[in-house]
Image (spheres, rainbow, N blue to C red):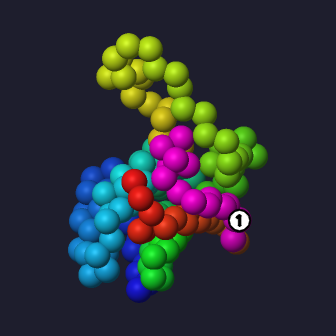
Amino acid sequence: MKIRLSIERDLEQIGPVGECLKQLCSLGDYPEMARVELLVSELLTNVIKHSVPDENSQHEFPVGLTVVADGDNLTLSVSEIGKPMSCDVVKSYTDTQIEMPASEGDVFELPESGWGVQLIKSICNDISYERLDDSNVLHLCFDLKAAA
């Protein structure tokens, strides 16, 4: 199965994208679907909040999402027109080391922002980045049947 979505750079679009993915992937009996929805939500939030090519025309540059489900494997490709990602940002996504913070006490006391990339990395089996024409494309691959 392969689907392509194009959404405006608007956080309100993330919920409907999750619902769409849930409906499409329900056809395949994937037990890890909640993780896929969480991953997509985090990734789209990061793209929408942090990769605006021009603040005055952000809605003119939609975010693309391609989903390919092939057996037990799922690949999500998120693309957006904009400046190339900095080497530091690319490394934060593609570096294999996951640095989750040590939590002493109540985890609900941790700051809310800054954990999305680590969460994405903890879910995916592989993450890669490429620059195609004027677009940044992040590919996320993982095993849908893997044990939680």
Q: Which residues are magenta?
A: 118-132
Q: Residue at x 53, y 26 (%)?
A: 101
Which residue is located at x 41 percent, y 68 percent?
145
Examine the rendering and report whether any part of residue 20 can be seen.
no
Residue 19 seen by the camera: yes
Picture quarter with the N terminus: bottom left
Instruction: Give the quadrant of residue 81.
Output: bottom right
Q: Residue at x 68, y 48 (%)?
A: 96
Is residue 82 toward the left or the right of residue 46 in the image?
right
Look at the image and say whether residue 131 sits in the magenta stretch. Answer: yes
Whether 113 is drawn above or below 118: the answer is above
Residue highlighted by disc 1: 131
Which percent across, then down, holds residue 134?
A: 67, 66
Q: Find residue 137 and report its horizontal and vertical position in percent.
A: 61, 65
Q: Amino acid at mark 1?
A: Arg
Q: On the rendered structure, is 3 left or right of 54? A: left
Residue that sits furthest to the top in the current view = 105
Outermost residue toward the front? 147
Residue projecting furthest to the right: 87
Residue in view at x 40 percent, y 74 percent: 5
Q: Is residue 99 above or below residue 129?
A: above
Farthest bottom residue?
A: 1
Residue 65 x/y as whole percent: 46, 69
Q: How busy is the neighbourhood of tag 1: few (under 14 within 10 Å), some, or many (20 plus)?
A: some
Asked if residue 59 is positioned above or below residue 30 in the image, the reply reads above
Residue 63 in magenta stretch: no
Residue 26 drawn at (x, y percent):
25, 75
